[in-house]
Amino acid sequence: MKVTERPSLKAFNTFRVDARAGLLLTIETEEELLSLSPFCAKRDLVLGEGSNTLFAGDVPGTVFLNRIAGKEILEVKDKQVLVEVGAGENWHQLVLWSLKHNLYGLENLSLIPGSTGAAPIQNIGAYGMELSSVLESVTAWDWQKSAWVTLRQDECELGYRDSRFKSRERDRYLITSVRLQLDQEFRPRLDYSGLRQELAMEGSSRPTGRAVSDAVIRLRRARLPDPAVAGNAGSFFKNPVVSRSDGSALLADNPDLPYRLTGDSMLKISAAWMIEQCGLKGFRNGDAGISDQHALVLVNYASATGAEIQKLAEHVQSVVYAQFGIRLEPEPRIIDFSA
Ligand code: FAD
Ligand code: EPU
């Protein structure tokens, strides 16, 4: 286990904001966890690759950097393949590994930054698919009980950008591995119209898994700013989910507002569109700004602080609320231990 005192966290978050921790422990094996002192939710933090975290302040205690590696095929039955993956494995490298082994189910989630262990935290999703369609179970260290636990998918309370790990039991577990149910047979998931169009452009009526992954990668590169160029955490706000009656009222006033129907007949409406309609796309205050490429992405152009980005996010929330009566909810974890 690597131990660093008073480290800068700048290299450990994709917003590339500067913050400090009391201590940084890089954990590479499950055994190392057993030698650690208990986690204190008021001072400490588990971190993957920091691609959904905004440091609005320092971490007074310890950052547990999860770098537990390993990918293993556990079982093959009726073309269904159960795979166990260490929480510290990079998500996109896992997607590429699955394609190399002719295992399917992850292609729509190509190029999502971050670690595999963080994927269940907000049930990562993109291009018409969420982790919930392949997650079998999660193994974690339960800080509260000082014990290993395995939670089946139906116990993880996965929702749109949500889970028990993100909401009601935040900081209770350190996820060490996940099990995914993959398929030896490729079944394209092409509900997302933009993905269908992208594949149609290359004249592919029966795409391969690799072709779907490549198309998703192209779409993502064209739409989202690269954190290596301007620090960001992807979408900064969730798309609001509203009742049919509230949605109908909004659509009557704003007929161009993009929306989708959810499984439970709610309306998921586009936060990016509302931000753009408020004239905020491309808005910049010092080094903190709203991307001119995608209105849902807040960016650090050079040396914005996390607090400046948080302040900008609050400004966006109040402007959108004033115009549409909708309160936008941040997607990333905002770290502010002083609050
Ligand atoms: P971190 O930021 O390190 O952590 C996020 C949260 O999870 C924190 O609360 C942390 O405490 C907790 N956590 C992390 N690892 C563990 C663990 N092992 N055990 C317990 N808790 C843990 N997300 C999507 O869903 N869809 C997208 O399309 C998408 N696109 C993105 C595009 C860009 C350019 C960027 C920068 C981000 C995007 N994201 C997207 C968000 C992000 O990629 C995901 O949320 C990802 O799963 C975060 O992984 P991470 O390891 O970086 O998490
Ligand atoms: N739009 C605008 N202005 C913009 C950008 C988009 O009006 O600047 C409109 C588009 O015209 C489109 C709609 O907003 O009609 C939706 O845009 P997009 O397809 O880019 O998707 P999104 O809703 O903005 C969501 C996820 C992304 C995910 C994509 C693709 C959330 C909060 N975001 O974005 O996830 O990659 O769909 O499936 O659900 C993330 O979570 O970090 C993330 C990037």
Image (cartoon, grey):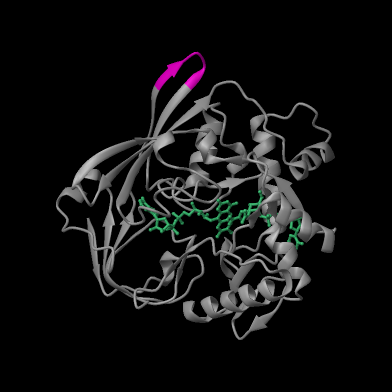
User: Does residue 77 appear to the left or right of 302 in the view shown?
Assistant: left
Q: Position of residue 34 (x, y in %)?
A: 16, 48
Location of residue 277 in the rendering, given as x and y in whole percent from the top left corner: 78, 70
Taking depth in this image into account, of 177 and 204 the one nearest to the observer is: 177
Instruction: Kindly identify the residue that appears in the image at 26 percent across and 46 percent down.
Output: 141
Q: Main secondary structure of the magenta part?
A: strand
Q: Considering the image in quadrants, where does the N terminus appear?
A: bottom left
Q: Foreground residue, 187 or 333?
A: 333
Residue at x-position 70% and y-position 67%: 295
Residue 132 highlighted magenta (yes or no): no
x%, y% of residue 172? 30, 53
Q: Is residue 254 visible?
A: no
Vertical comparison of 176 with 55: above or below: above
Q: Position of residue 145 (x, y in %)?
A: 19, 47
Q: Which residues are magenta?
A: 75-80
Q: Is residue 131 left or right of residue 205?
A: left
Figure check: 241 above or below 208: below
Quadrant in the picture for residue 19: bottom left
The quadrant of the picture occupied by the C terminus is bottom left
At x 63% / y 66%, what residue is drawn? 297
Name the residue located 81 percent from the left edge and 41 percent from the top edge.
Answer: 197
Task: Please identify the quarter of the rendering in which residue 13 is found.
Answer: bottom left
Please state if 171 lies on the left or on the right of 103 as rendered.
Answer: left
Magenta highlight on residue 76? yes
Q: Please say whether residue 92 is visible from this viewpoint.
A: yes
